[in-house]
Amino acid sequence: MVQWGAIFSVFLLLLCLDFSYPYIIFTALVVSPDAYSRECIIFLNQITTDFCSAHVDRLRQCARLSSVQVHTKEREVQHSRNVKEDFNARLQGISEKVNAISMKLKQKSVDVEEAKEETETLCEELEDCSHALSELDVAVQEFGEQNPLLARQLGATLSRLTELHSQTSRLAEGRTSRIKKAEQYFEEFNEMLTSVLNWTEKAETLVSANVLWNPPSMMQEQIRMHQALLREWRKLQGKMEGLVQRVGLLAEVVQTEALHHQVAELSHHAEELQQRAKTRLLSLQDAAKDLGRLESEVKGLHQSIERVQEILASPDLARLSLREQLLQRQILLTEMEGFKAQVQAVQMCMSALQLPEDVVAALPLCVTAQSLQQDSSQLQHTTIQQCNILQVHTRAGTYSIPITLFKEE
């Protein structure tokens, strides 16, 4: 009895492995199923064993080949991953460096010199980044031959980074241009500052010096010096405004808080000096006017006293009769009544002097005024005594009086 079930199973197996074997077996079974059944089974067992062994070898070879291909693919994938990580790390490093440079370019330095040095250094770093980007671009293009997809991704990142670098380069160029202008602004600032400081130094010296009230020529010289100082101050206003303007322009590059504070303090100090100089000038001018009036009154009093003294000491007066001498002295006494008004005018002028008491006491003009007041009083007193003597001798009928008598008086 032919075991058709087993034969059919083998038949299907052989059909799956090779189309030629099932055809041979099928033919043999159809022609002589009984005669060949045993031999067929033996044959089938044999060829199945051989065939399976051969195909197992082939499968093993395929497996080994697949394993090699898998390992190769894994190495390629790992290599691509390593290359991508390397590129990304380099891109990240350049990106961080460019961003850091961009932030520093936007920051303000302490002064112009520091800003200039920092900008030069940052420009050099940008140039290094540019070289690194160029090298990276070449490497990405070469890598694109192996992995076009990954190369396109890296290329897109590289393009964005290149644009960031370009923006930062433009930022550096703008800062360099502003620093060049800032150097000029700072030079102008220093020139103006020097002018203002020179003025304040001169003003401090002038307003701190003691006022010389004598001689009058020295007082006039001090008035001229104060007037010249105040004229310079009016011209200095433009420079003070220029200082504030230059500080505003420098604010684009450097920190200007200290400069603002310096200019504000200097302006306040200069204003104080200007006010002190103005006050001293007014005081000097008022004192000069008061001293001028005093000098005029003293001069008038002095002339009046001298005129009376000359008349009293005149030989012509001595040759007159006693009665005529008495009459002349009485006329002079009447005129000397005007001394009181002149003395009062002198005293009022001295009282109006807005000067320290020690200064007034030491001024030669004031000393002269005090002396003239005493002289006028003494002269008037002496003349009255002479008139009294003359009246006595006139009543007695005396025709002459010894000169020594008047001298003693």
Image (cartoon, rainbow, N blue to C red):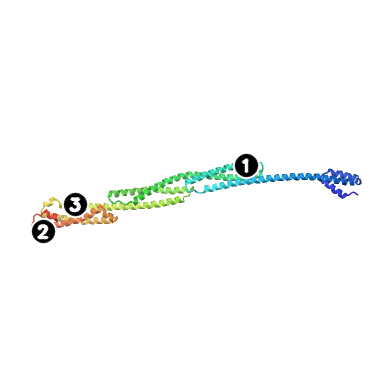
Report the Cα–Cα distance between label 3 and label 2.
27 Å
Identify the residue at horizontal 36%, vertical 50% (top origin): 204
Which mark is drawn over residue 275? none
Q: Is residue 233 visible?
A: no
Q: For the residue labelled by badge 1, is the local secondary structure a helix, a strand or a loop?
A: helix
**Relative depth, front residue between 244 and 111:** 111
**Contact flag, marks 1 and 2 (Cβ < 8 Å):** no
**Of circles 1 and 3, which is in front?**
1
The kind of residue on which mark 1 rests is Ala
**Contact flag, marks 1 and 3 (Cβ < 8 Å):** no
Report the Cα–Cα distance between label 1 and label 3.
116 Å
Q: Which residue is mark 1?
A: 139
Identify the residue at horizontal 85%, vertical 47% (top origin): 10
Mark positioned earlier in the residue sequence (3 or 2) = 3
The kind of residue on which mark 3 rests is Glu
Q: For the residue labelled by badge 3, is the local secondary structure a helix, a strand or a loop?
A: helix
Res 135 → quadrant:
top right
Mark 1: few, some, or many residues within 10 Å (few <14, many ≥20)? few
Q: Which residue is mark 2?
A: 392
Q: Which residue is mark 3?
A: 306
**Relative depth, front residue between 297 and 45:** 45
Q: Is residue 82 visible?
A: yes
Q: How many marks?
A: 3
Mark 3: few, some, or many residues within 10 Å (few <14, many ≥20)? some
The kind of residue on which mark 2 rests is Val
Q: For the residue labelled by badge 2, is the local secondary structure a helix, a strand or a loop?
A: helix
Identify the residue at horizontal 72%, vertical 44% (top origin): 68
Mark positioned earlier in the residue sequence (1 or 3) = 1
Q: Position of residue 279 (x, y in %)?
A: 34, 53
